[in-house]
Amino acid sequence: MNRFHHSSAIYRTATSAALVLFSQAALAWGPHTEIAQAALTALGTGDGIYKQLGADTGVLAQYVWMADWRTQLLIRTDEVFYADDYLLFPKAKTHSQHICPEVKQTYAPFFRRALQALRTESPRNAARWIGSLLHFTTDTGSPPHAAGFLGAAHSKMENWVDAKLIHLPEYQPQLLGEDDSAAEAGFLARMDGLIEFSKERAARCRADVDADRREPVEPVVLESALETARVTADLLHTLGVLAARPASGASLSGTVALQKNNHPSLDRLPAKVVLLGTDFSTLTAPDGSFAFRHLPEGDYKLVALAPGATSAPMAVSLRSGGFIVPQLALSAAASGNLLRNGDFLLQWSGADALDHWSMKTPPGKLAAKTSVRDWDGEWLPLEKGVSYRLEAHWKKSAPQAESPLVFVRLKPAASGPAVPTETEPLNAPSDHITLNGTQEAAWAQVCIRAAQAPQEVLESVQFRREN
Ligand SMILES: [Zn+2]
């Protein structure tokens, strides 16, 4: 089924890019959960962050992994969501590396976004945004991440630590600033301090790591883990204090009615609601309801989006008090298509970005040699024994010079070492292929490979159950 029909110059590099991505994911500091838990325990249930998040506070110890789940669909007993809905937004259009110096560019936008979520969204949504911020924060404290050290010993250096020893008895969390701006500056300064702290530890244990001597390394890495937990406690305490301050603004709420697509996990995926031209976004609750609080008064354009359907922008004029949106029905447009933004209508995160499609530039010199880019859709779980149909609806005027392709990548598990295989590609004017969900093809990602933006060559791409 997975025949390789590629003449395109970037085919081989797409495969090696997948390998690079995987090895990046393998650079994971083990004790994220223990660090977050130590910070929460140090804060105690009387802290403001517990008042803000309620029952969702404890989930931070899992959501602290958020940024390592990028591009993944999380399927749990009580929730289904794409991690990218909490990692990509207008102020962070692409994923960042979790290592210094690049990770530093995440601090300010994710601090602001987490604070915004606490003030305007449900506790569950806020906890997920805080999870992203905590991931970047805690990864930074890992000695090789602080030192920008990617060598062979990276993984040993950051995982030679006994996570059971990460506790902060007696720690008094510090407020990083009295208002949003002061707290952001205080957080950035605290992170600079953490980087210096862990860089020094990286240098101190480097020779022992290289010589494979674990014993003297462990207490040094533990110092970094404990300092990271202190920073995490300060950060959570500060978010709780700032979010408790009285806020003005208007509320906006409503319900999105979704048509089910006969897919066990994607039918549980909430709709996403965004306000165009702003950083405001949220996911609906399982019953389809959404609510924003404390939005600045003004005129907004609201768009709701789900697999197979994007609503037309709705003008909303917010004045003090509340505004209830009449029920938004996405069902009329729903076509069984499992892709989000398959008709390329939504560019909330920026005019140069396409929501729910991520553009991959070929690495190195190849990027300059070709204007062909891969636009990767979101990974979709397939059911074994079910047949699926990929349809490309080409534009009449689609340029043929560097003939654009649409194909599907397939892999056996949501994460892991398997290099995805690829189906044969669709070239204009061919319009569909079918494939089956199997053990090996348990996850599918539609990829558009073109020299133009997808919306210039395609009306839409659809991926649905065949029957
Ligand atoms: Zn990471």
Image: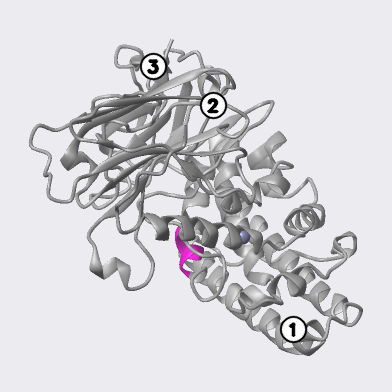
Q: Is residue 106 magenta?
A: yes
Q: In the image, what residue occupies the spot 73% across and 50% down? A: 47
In magenta, the rendered stretch is 105-109
Q: Secondary structure at mark 1?
A: helix
Q: Which mark is residue 336?
A: 3
Amino acid under disc 2: Leu
Asked whether the viewer can see residue 139, the reply is yes
Residue neighbourhood size for the residue with mark 3, other residues' Cα within 10 Å, grouped as few (<14), some (14–19), many (≥20): many
In the figure, 149 relative to 96: above or below?
A: below
Q: Nearer the viewer, residue 328 or 358?
A: 358
Residue 123 shows up from this direction: no
**Closer to the eye: label 2 or 3:** 2
Position above or below: 274 against 139: above
Image quadrant of ligand 1 equals: bottom right
Image-based side of 96 in relation to 229, left or right: left
Residue underneath mark 2: 382
Residue 309 located within the stretch drawn in magenta? no
Q: CA distance from mark 2 to mark 3?
A: 14 Å
Position of residue 402 relative to residue 171, above or below, is above
Q: How is the image coloured?
A: one colour
The C terminus is located in which quarter?
A: top left
Residue beneath disc 1: 201
Camera-side residue: 138 or 238?
Answer: 138
Mark 2 residue element: loop
Q: Residue at x 58, y 57 (%)?
A: 22
**Kind of residue indicated by mark 3:** Gly
User: Where residue 321 sits in the image (x, y, percent)?
Assistant: 37, 29
